Image (tube, helix red, strand yellow):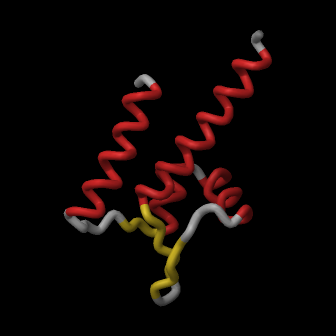
Amino acid sequence: MTELETCSNLIADAIIRKTIPFNDDISESQARELYGDKWLRRMKRCGLAEYNRVGNRNIFSRHQLNCLRQAEREHAKLVFARINK
């Protein structure tokens, strides 16, 4: 996927989420399966992954985690582009 397509997909997700509210919440165990245990722990430790406590469960937003992952990948692309010059 190109950078423009990825950016437009994230924007479309945000627009849909605002206009037609739907439940994109996932539990911590589902987030660990989808995004990786190490990555999720690092994002929580840095305070970037926002979650709500419901009972004894941590609930994450799938859209917010997708945005975090994409932002992290964009920074990595910039670093590798500078190294290869």
Residue 84 appears at what percent x and percent y? 76, 12
Seen at 24% across and 67% down, the residue is 21
Point out the residue furthest to the bottom here.
55
Quadrant where the C terminus is found in the figure: top right
Point out the residue furthest to the left here.
20
Seen at 36% across and 46% down, the residue is 11
Quadrant where the N terminus is found in the figure: top left
Residue 33 appears at what percent x and percent y? 49, 53
Residue 53 vs residue 38, the one in the foreground = 53
Residue 78 appears at what percent x and percent y? 68, 27
Q: Say left or right for 12 vs 43.
A: left
As drawn, 12 above or below 56: above
Q: Say left or right for 3 vs 46.
A: left
- Name the image quarter holding residue 24: bottom left
Seen at 29% across and 54% down, the residue is 15
Residue 20 vs residue 34, the one in the foreground = 20
As drawn, 74 above or below 83: below
Q: Say left or right for 51 vs 84.
A: left
Q: How many marks?
A: 0
Q: Say left or right for 67 vs 47.
A: left
Seen at 38% across and 67% down, the residue is 25
As drawn, 1 above or below 21: above
